[in-house]
Amino acid sequence: MVLLKVEDLSVHYKIYGNWVRAVDDVSIELDSGETLGLVGESGSGKSTLAYAITQLLPNNAYIKKGKIIFNDQDLFKYTLKPDGTLNVYDENIRKIRWKEISMIFQASLNAFNPVYKVGDQIKEAILAHEPDISEEELERRVIELYDFVGIPRDRINNYPHEYSGGMKQRAMIAMALALRPKLVLADEPTTAVDVITQDRILKEIIDLQKKLGMAMILITHDVSVVAEVSHKIAVMYAGQIVEKGTTREVFKHYAHPYTEGLLNSFPNLFGEKKRLSFIPGSPPDLANPPKGCRFHPRCPYAREICAEQSPPLIEISPGHYSACHFATSIYGGK
Amino acid sequence: MIGNTVVKVENVKKYYELHKGLLSFGPSLVVKAVDGISFELHEGEIIGIVGETGSGKTTTGRMLVLLERPTSGKIYFEGTDISELKGNKLKEFRKNVQMVFQDPYESLNPRFTILKTLMEPLIIHKIGDTYEERVDIVIRALEDAGLKPGEEYLGRYPHEVSGGQRQRIAIARALVTSPKFIVADEPVSMLDVSIRAGVLNLMLDLREKLRIPFIFITHDIAVARYMSDRIFVMYLGKIVEYGSSEDVIFDPLHPYTRSLVAAIPVPDPDRKHERVLIKGEIPSPINVPPGCKFITRCVYAQKGICDVKEPELREVKPGHFVACHFAEQIMNGELKPKEEDLQKEEYMM
């Protein structure tokens, strides 16, 4: 069942009179219980896309076009104002947000209020959506969540500063799951923690997802994390999706020069030790993106047409899409 | 390829005493950031120091360039004890060692042009006689750092160049005094993934070309393997294992290194993930108990031995050292993790 459908979404920011094209013509689809890894560098638009899905864009963000259908509801129907900005306070969307779509923020250290106990903050989130819940039931739910993410129960009445980094991240996960959402957006959930903690949190996310059957969008710059966790992957570059498909397909038969560059620029821990290749140049300024294919100034295969025409995202094999004029000639028709 | 010893570190410790409140009594609290480490760095060699947050890897790097003074122990640079350097000798030392910091957005003065940033060390150390000569040295350093043509960058400010170029400028600044060794502290962790590899390759090239030895500090063991000839694994201020990069990664002997290696995600959806056998998180470095410092997280810890006697680094295989009482037994599978730990393991934090 299709849970989330983003169709041709364009979100542009107005900054000092310039239009920054943060997300341009992005379409993704996600079924219940599925994990999508959204990979890209900083400034590629992946977080903007996530905030658009939660309808939490700032007031200088304008929806230029597109739709977000979640659970058969058009979310913009509730929030879109005539000028293209969002009314983030809309009552209907507030009922959906956190109850059905929740988010694990990157900096869990800052996501909690330092002067309230962590358990109370989770209770507050539950109370906001279920005001009639009894005190005992509320207590029971929080204990259940703590058991679930593996934080000892006696920590419920601690303040955020008494938690270690990994524990805070777990508490953040508990809070995101407090209302059993259908979709969780995880924005770089493990960037701020050490590798051993990262490994545990990822395992936990996979376990919980299996148990609860929720869908997840995992936003990260680390392709290895995606390889371990996601069913599907979408690679973003300069506000656009350049390649998407199942994780296995994209890793084994990548069909876009940016994906190729990204995969080859990570040192592999166990593979043969060979010189890393890297992508020359740096990501473009989205206030003034290059004409044609946005990747062409950095692309080793670029030809004339690339500077002229923007390549469409085409299906090169079932379920595998690439936005490159030469996807099949470079990478074969597989 | 390995040449003379450039830096020798002997049993170096760095303790920080915590300030207590006015009315608190009893023994003062001591953070043992670095607790007795020794190693040698040779000409043309890159040593990778890996560890989690709080393992003491950054403090080690800062002591090597004398940004911190060791509480005890000695650091020798080309045979001289650097703690005794004063006046001109100290200045000479500062010229010879350079550091590349993690965040190029903070380590460059935003109000200095790139020329001014790179010129300062030349003026301070009286390198080059005329202005033109110094500009030449600056241009050469920029080009060594992969910024070609160097002239183009001289008049720019840090905000006018990209993150990757900024880190290259920080490297050029380190190169401008022709240092004899460089400490690089997480030099790529703030950079975008697509440009990291370029900066890593640059440092490898500089080692080839100029034979500058590096100390490369990182939390990413895959990057450490790519960069280093030898890897040193630190845990709570101690070196727990070291050896050639390939030995440490493919044949880790210390239970901590084994978990560290097993925990790394690998960009291959077909690879089966090994189970990570470790409990909890790195404990606070304040007043750590006697015995092995890893005991709180080790699933192999033996009562009466590990909690009493601190393991010394010993050579288990040629050139491969480990600080664990039971390294061989764990390796051969003679010592099994405790069953109750295996069950709890997932949920211990």
Image (spheres, coloured by chain):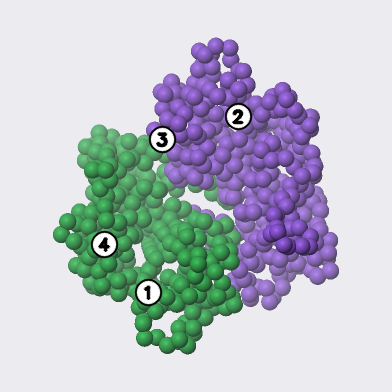
Chain colours: A green, B purple
Give the CA separation, mark 2 to mark 3: 31 Å
Q: Nearer the viewer, mark 2 or mark 1?
A: 1
In which chain is the residue bearing label 3?
A: B
Give the CA separation, mark 2 to mark 1: 54 Å
- Of the residues shown, which amino acid type is indicated by label 2? Glu
Decide: few, some or many residues near mark 2? Use Cα within 10 Å; few <14, some 14-19, many ≥20: few
Q: Are marks 1 and 4 in contact (CB under 8 Å)?
A: no
Q: Nearer the viewer, mark 4 or mark 2?
A: 4
Q: Nearer the viewer, mark 2 or mark 3?
A: 3
Residue A241, percent across and down?
31, 52
- Of the residues shown, which amino acid type is indicated by label 4? Val
Residue at image coords 51%, 27%:
B117
| Residue under pointer 3 | B159
Q: Are marks 4 and 2 in contact (CB under 8 Å)?
A: no
| Residue under pointer 4 | A6
Q: Toward the viewer: B80 or B84?
A: B84
Residue at image coords 25%, 73%:
A92
Q: Horizontally, is A90 left or right of A189 in the view?
A: left
Query: Disc number at residue B257?
Result: none
| Residue under pointer 2 | B208
* Precedes in sequence: disc 1 or disc 4: 4
Q: Horizontally, is A275 left or right of A132 in the view?
A: right
Residue B224, percent across and down?
60, 45
Give the CA separation, mark 1 to mark 4: 18 Å
Residue at image coords 64%, 29%:
B212
Figure quadrant of residue A195:
bottom right
Q: Are marks 3 and 4 in contact (CB under 8 Å)?
A: no
Q: Are marks 4 and 2 on the same chain?
A: no
| Residue under pointer 1 | A181
